[in-house]
Image (cartoon, rainbow, N blue to C red):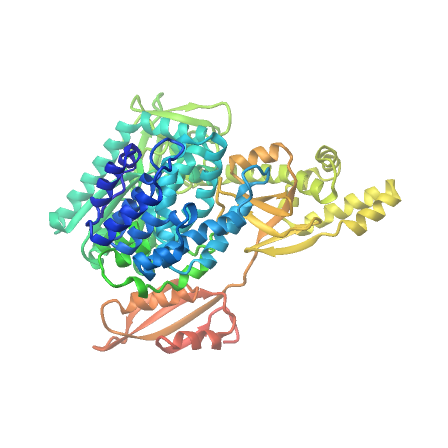
Amino acid sequence: MNQVDIKQIKEINSITSATEYLYSFIAPSPMLQKALDYSKSAHENQFRKSGEPYVVHPILVAGIVSSITNDESMAIAALLHDVVEDTIISIEEVKELFGPDVAHLVEGLTKIDTIRDAELIPSNSNEKLVVSALSFRKMLLASIKDVRVLVVKLCDRLHNMLTLDSLAPHKQERIAEETLVVYAPIAHRLGISFLKNLLEDLSFSYLFKEEKAQIDTYLENHYHAIEMRLNEFREAIHKILVQNGFCEDDIEILSRVKHRYSIYLKMQRKGVGIEEVLDLLALRVLTNDPVKCYNILGLIHLHFQPLSSRFKDYIAVPKDNGYKTIHTTVFYKTAIFEVQIRTYDMHQTAELGVAAHWKYKSGGNDNIKLDWLHNLGYQNESVEDFYDLIKNDLYSEDISVFSPKGEVFTLPRGAVVLDFAYAVHTHVGNHAKSALVNKVKTSLINELHNGDIVKIELDENTITRCSWLDAVKTSKAKTNIRYNCNARVREIDARSSVNIVATAMNENPLKVEEWLDKNNCDKRAGVATDIEHFKDVLHRYMSQISESNRLKGFFSRHMLKLKLYSLRGLEIFSTSSVNDVVFDYCCHPKNGDEVMAFLEKGKAHVHHKMCSSAAKKLDAKEPMIFVRWEKLKIYNYDMIVSLQSGVGTLAEFLNFLAKLKIDINQIELGKNKSESTRYCEIGFESKEADINALRAKIEQKIKVIHFIRTDDAYR
């Protein structure tokens, strides 16, 4: 696959070099040359803020498009994408000169700018752009029916992001925010991961400069150590695969460091520093056959201890956008690695998404059918965790490690330095900031070995490490980490409760805090998590007001009614009107995360409780409202189906169940196996309460032998 070289593109500033770049990806046909000449003529005497000829921009956009797909219509549309809006040329003229397909694409691209002008707030407004950007994205996806238009627009936005330096800082931030809220999510849902990552990282560099500088500094300072770890782990996997029958030509192993914005989001959601991001390092193993993917997975799990909670099989159950890959995370010496396993074809789809459907196929553009394109809701991403993989080794041996004074500590094999710290004392574990193993400075999640001498260096404050729960092995370490994380959340809840009550009562937060200290100190945190407790506190507060001021108490009781709003999977209780929910891009909370919400102009801005941006809002005592995820009733089922023997039939059936929003708990295959059919028993969960309706849906696809609700005692 051709990869976009952003450094190369940034250095191109002449028409000649831009044209060379375009023709390095696509052959110069007469029609393409005609479009190039036409674009040059249309944009003659037009220049960008940087001073370069304007036509360099559409030529480079066409080059980026051609690096993704060999669709000539898309390349021509990229060359002409600004002519209708920025010049006197009409869409009818484009149609007459270049045909209906190109005109259709150019019209779609022009329409995006029209929607943008209508939906996005003007640049001189003080309102937060994120609200109108979400509306813009929704309108754009509802209006643009041809996915090719979106792909060209994403390439256009990528080049705009690469040339932001010539604009004023406030414009840089505005365009970066729009890119992060509108275009990167679209690239994600179209499955074009390399575009998504580039757009996110470029936006990140303008919106969170300090945070990016910190991540860059860490990665630069640890560059050699990171490279050594990646190379060593890559060689270890390569050696194991070759020793177990894989030929050199069967596999390719790629290594990478998680991209910057992804690292930042992990830090925000977990409330941790970069050194605590577990899957910072990753390897990708490519092979030529799906079955070999599972062979590779088995060999990796046999030789390296996996984190059972971080396994996902998207080959058996692909994502809606066609993404197929096995994800697993394993321990290796001093680090934790994410390993992705996929075929070369899956790699094309993962990098290019929808564009992979026509990258190497001709004549397929008109018939691309993407039903999921109309359901591009950003927050409700479903993840199918179909398998509960292996637990810790049943026969793990103990190891003995020593303190600098020679005290012996017995730990389970696979224990890390932090396990040792907690074994010494709870205080040591809670305050551990770094360690020396055999007089060499090392990470707190470095795996220990027999005879190691360990010295722990302490910090004055308790250090919370919520993301390390899976890294430690001993129950003492797990219990204390979990306790510290819960305590941190309780402390955030206690502070949030003051703002939530103050907002509901339209009172000064300092006055509310004083009242809570006097009346409700022990249970303050419950206001942010328990709606009945929140209602009780409001009732008591109103009663006290009534006792001191009857008129004010009367208005409080009648004007401040707590209302329930159900929006985008959330339940919100507020005395003020709430008309929408905004999931802010600084932390992107997911369904089920610990969340809190700030009220701004009738909209609930939802953040992860560990988010540093939310912490600043909390400190500033900004208005807050009670929020929680909607609880949906889940029903348990068991069924036996008759499955036709054949390659891929099980994967196809599992994919069908995924589309019915069915979560599988267990599978047993091979009951009463015959040459043509075999029975498959599946235990699963569903939100569907009607057993007959659910069975009817499944029987549209396969023959059902047995079907019951396991949580119904009368069945």
Q: From the viewer's perspective, is 33 left or right of 428?
A: left
The reply to whether residue 689 is in sight is yes
Eyeballing the image, is 314 above or below 256? below
Residue 563, x across and y down, in percent: 69, 54
Residue 260, x across and y down, in percent: 37, 36
Residue sitting at x 43%, y 27%: 432
Which sits in the foreground, 523 or 656? 656
Residue 515, x across and y down, in percent: 75, 36
Q: Determine the image quadrant of residue 337.
A: top left
Q: From the viewer's perspective, is 464 left or right of 231?
A: right
Residue sitting at x 39%, y 38%: 161
Which sits in the foreground, 538 or 165? 165
Which sits in the foreground, 659 or 293? 659
Residue 90, x across and y down, in percent: 40, 54
Q: From the viewer's perspective, is 288 left or right of 700?
A: left
The reply to whether residue 608 is in sight is no
